[in-house]
Amino acid sequence: MDSRIAIGRIRRPHGLAGAFKVSSFSGEYDHFALPKVYHLSNGTGSRDFEVEWVKLSGALTLVKLKGLDTPEQVRRYSNWEIYVDRSFAAPLRSTEEYYYADLIGMKAVCGGAVRGTVTALFQDLPDDTLEIEVTENGKKVLVPFRSNFVGRVDSDAGTIEILDDWFFQ
């Protein structure tokens, strides 16, 4: 398990001093104010920034990072994900909850047999979608993360149940 977890995404600049709006992956915003450092990543690049201030107001939460002092500087990081140490993530409220990041690496089980491994999760499609590498042939299949295709997620066992075998054919 990675020690960092993505909690949100930088949206657009706010004002002229380098502040920006954030969107939360969990729907909660209080945990944005806890870390002293954000690790920003866009998949190909990454950079750490010290948090200067956070103004909490739900979906209009604003953040200012040291070193980003103009809207133009912030725009370079628009749509980058904000990673923090896992201890700062929104807490799980039950054993039925899990972080999407923890699905990566889980075994995909269908009909009681391991059929593959979750290699990615895409959240920018119409539905959140699992990418699964099939064990028997190495091809990658996409499974919409919906209740009619995905059953039980067992964090303790490291498995996720896929309800239809046809994904693997």
Image (spheres, grey):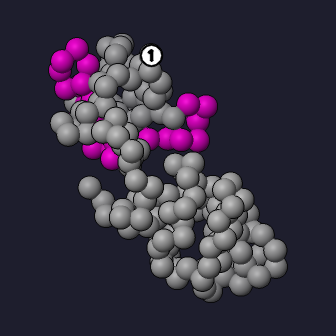
Residue for point 17% across, 20% down: 113
Does residue 154 appear in this view?
Answer: yes
Image quadrant containing the N terminus = bottom left
Image-quadrant location for residue 75: bottom right
Q: Residue furthest right?
A: 16
Residue 149, percent across and down?
A: 42, 19
> Which of 132 and 57 lies nearest the eye of the viewer?
57
Q: In the image, is 125 to the left or to the right of 39?
A: right
Residue for point 58% across, 36% down: 125
> Which of 119 and 23 lies nearest the eye of the viewer?
23
Does residue 119 appear in this view?
Answer: no
What residue is pinned by disc 1?
Answer: 148
Q: In the image, is 66 to the left or to the right of 98?
A: right
- In the rendered image of this protein, does residue 44 appear above or below residue 94? below
Image quadrant containing the C terminus = top left
> Which of 63 and 2 lies nearest the eye of the viewer?
63
Residue 60, percent across and down?
A: 72, 59
Residue 163, percent across and down?
A: 34, 16
Residue for point 27% across, 44% down: 105
Q: Which residues are magenta?
A: 102-127
- In the rendered image of this protein, does residue 161 appear above or below residue 77? above
Was residue 50 drawn as part of the magenta stretch in this picture?
Answer: no
Residue for point 72% across, 79% down: 18
Classed neighbour count for the residue bearing mark 1: other residues with Cα under 10 Å, few (<14), some (14–19), many (≥20): few
- In the rendered image of this protein, does residue 133 appear above or below residue 151? below
Amino acid found under the numbered disc labelled 1? Asn
Image-quadrant location for residue 118: top left
